[in-house]
Each structure stands twice: as structure tokens, then as C-alpha cells.
Image (spheres, helix red, strand yellow):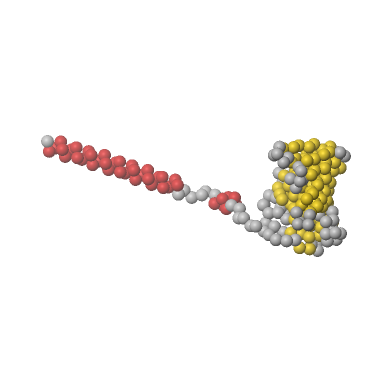
Amino acid sequence: MGFYYNTLMKRSTLIIGISVAIGIGLSFLYVQIITLPDKNPSQKEQDTITYDPDLAPPKSLQGSIIYMDGDVKWQSRTATESAKLDASTSIQQGELIETGDNGATTILFGEGTLIDIFHKSSVAFTQTLPANIVITHQRGKAEYSQETLATPLSIRAGHLLVTLHKGVASITLKETKNTDSQVKESIVTVKVIQGSATAVYNSLNYKTKYRELDEGEVLFYNDISRESEIY
């Protein structure tokens, strides 16, 4: 009886010892797996992008001022108001250009997007990614030229969004304010000089309206009543 009991105890002890050893081995292997060092830390560092508010997204396009005359103002990404521009500068996403009574400027993005900004106008470069350039036309008149379909060009004027399909379009936004400085009239005029364009807006009852414009056609859009006509 004593011999059988001792043998049983020895076997139990051996089994427990083997189980503990296996458990420790698996735990050690698990720790090794989760703490395995990066085989290519340099690549990981390259993929890490540090955000800098002074700079536009790395892949965004930068524009070049190729013509400037009269009173032209420029507002950087971090500025709170525009400052007079005395020399040509690059234009990046998030910046703004304003012209005075006698001001005018021309800005080129890449090889196919040209923007002529006339006097008493304001244009903001909302997005300049190669996948889609988005301009916010805030005031006045500008002429937009798009020579390629590779980089879509969209212009927002009020609640109207215009997409230019490889051509030239002139856009004018004119507002009239009352004595309380509230806008009582806001008219956007879109003239397709060459090519074609698509204009989209929501009506006051939230229905999406699409207007296709061909070469030579003019769209008049009322941003207050959200109505439009084509001539």
C-alpha cells in the first residue's frame, strides 16, 4: 500500500512539473512574440507624419503666382487677416487671395489649372490635392481654366458647387447688403466659355438640383431663393 501510494505521488509530481514547465515555456514564447522588435524601424519612422499647421498636406499641390498687378492681398494658413502682397509667392492649400479696386492676379496649379482673379474679388484655396482641387469663390469675378481631366476642378460659390470639365468658365458672385449689413441679394453667374460644366445645389426644401452647362451657356443662380436659370 505504501509503495503504491509513493509511486502515485511521484507520478503526480512529475505530471505537475511537466505542466508547469509547459506553461512557463508558452508564456515566455508569448512575451517574445508581442515584444518582437520592428525589423524595419526606419520605414516605420518614414511612415510617421508630424502635423504642422504652417504646412499644407504633403501631397497637396502648390500654386505659383505668374501675374500680379495693383492691390493684391494674401492670407496664409495661420493668419487671421490678409496682408498686402508685394512679391510673388507660392500658394498652398488653406490660403486665400484678395484683390482691391485695381488689383488682379493669375495663379497656376500644376500644368493644367489656371485661375485669373479680377479686381475686388476673394478666392480661397480650400483643397489642392491632386485627386480634386476645390476653390471657394467668396466674392467678385474669376476665370477658371482646366486643361486636363486628371485633376478635377470644383468651385464653390455660396451654396452652388460647379465642376469644370476640361474647359474655361467665368464665375461672378455679387452680393447686396441692407443697412444692417445682412445679405439681401446674392447672385452667382457662371458662364462656360469653353468645354462644359456641372452645377449642383440644394433647393430650400432640400432637393438636389443638377444643371448641365455646355459651351456658351450662362447660369444665373440666386443663393437666397436657391433657384437658377440657364440662358
Q: Position of residue 225 (x, y in %)?
A: 76, 43
Q: Position of residue 198 (x, y in %)?
A: 78, 39
Q: Residue at x 82, y 43 (%)?
A: 220
Q: Is residue 32 visible?
A: yes
The residue furthest left is: 1
Nearest the viewer among 187 and 121 is 187
Q: Position of residue 59 (x, y in %)?
A: 68, 49
124 sits to left or right of 46: right
56 sits to left or right of 30: right
Q: How many badges with numbers are in the image?
A: 0
The residue furthest front is: 179
Q: Quadrant of residue 101?
A: bottom right
Nearest the viewer among 172 and 83 is 172
Nearest the viewer among 142 and 55 is 142
89 sits to left or right of 52: right
Q: Position of residue 68 (x, y in %)?
A: 84, 58
Above or below, 183 against 191 in this view is below
Q: Is residue 115 visible?
A: no
19 sits to left or right of 147: left
Q: Residue at x 12, y 36 (%)?
A: 1
Please state, as top left, top right, bottom left or bottom right, where the C terminus lies in the image.
Answer: top right
Q: Residue at x 68, y 59 (%)?
A: 78
Q: Quadrant of residue 197?
A: top right
Q: Residue at x 76, y 37 (%)?
A: 210
